[in-house]
């Protein structure tokens, strides 16, 4: 349910910037590859009056612009593969921030998520004990998961304070 609400909100936000395909934003690294994604990100898609021949605007820093320019045919092919047809006919490279100069530099590196640590057996046992009173099995599992997450975070916070 929450995912459905978020998807509609994200879709509305992306459509105002011309992105009819959310995948272009949400899966940018997979579409163009890590090396290209580390140099640029999509900020806008502009459609011509007839609706054909859209222009994709990419944001980059000045030092990456020449390398990105060499990658444009590959980027265009990969983006059009996402759309399923030749939607993008031009790619424009901009070296300015999408919201203005006052916000400072834009970071392109995609931070890889650190693997999450797993709750200890003690925390899991305590979470199971706390949720044991629930009559409904689905509710019990949800409460157990919530309790284990909460207790695990509290346990990690205490460990950091002790250091």
Image: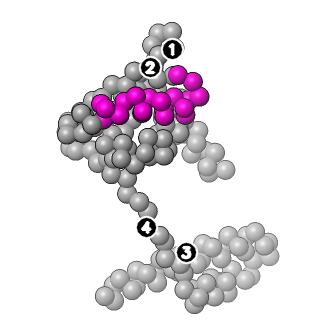
**Looking at the image, which is closer to me, 141 or 19?**
19
Does 82 lie within the magenta span?
A: yes
Q: Quadrant of residue 111?
A: bottom left
Extent of the magenta region: 68-86
* Mark found first going from the N terminus, 4 or 3: 4
Query: 159 or 81, which is in the foreground?
Result: 81
Q: Does the CB distance between marks 2 and 1 fall below 8 Å?
A: yes
**Rendered image: mark on residue 89:** 2
Q: Which residue is mark 3?
A: 149
Q: Quadrant of residue 97?
A: top left
Asked whether 135 or 119 is in front, the reply is: 119
Q: How is the image coloured?
A: one colour
User: Which residue matches tag 1?
Assistant: 52
Task: Classify residue 133 as left or right of residue 73.
Answer: right
Looking at the image, tell me whether mark 4 or mark 1 is earlier in sequence order.
1
Pointer 3 local density, CA inside 10 Å: few below 14, some 14–19, many at least 20 = some
**Circle 4 residue:** 114
In the image, taking residue 152 as reference, residue 57 lies left or right, namely left
Question: Of circles 2 and 1, which is in front?
Answer: 2
Query: Which mark's residue is nearer the viewer, 4 or 3?
Result: 4
Residue 104 image point, x, y percent: 20, 43
Asked whether 130 falls inside the magenta stretch, the response is no
Tell me where residue 77 appears, x and y as whole percent: 48, 30
């Amino acid at each position: 349910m929450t995912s459905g609400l978020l998807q509609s909100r994200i879709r509305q936000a992306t459509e105002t910037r011309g992105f009819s395909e959310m995948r272009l934003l949400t899966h940018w690294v997979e579409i163009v590859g890590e090396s290209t994604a580390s140099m640029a990100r999509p900020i806008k898609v502009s459609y011509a009056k007839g609706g054909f021949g859209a222009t994709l605007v990419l944001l980059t820093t000045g030092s990456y612009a020449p390398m990105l320019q060499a990658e444009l045919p590959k980027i265009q092919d990969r983006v059009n593969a996402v759309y399923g047809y030749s939607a993008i006919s031009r790619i424009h490279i901009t070296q300015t921030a999408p919201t203005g100069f006052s916000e400072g530099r834009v970071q392109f590196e995609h931070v890889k998520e650190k693997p999450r640590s797993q709750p200890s057996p003690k925390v899991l046992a305590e979470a199971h004990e706390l949720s044991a009173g629930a009559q409904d099995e689905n509710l019990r599992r949800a409460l157990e998961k919530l309790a284990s997450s909460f207790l695990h975070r509290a346990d990690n916070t205490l460990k950091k304070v002790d250091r």
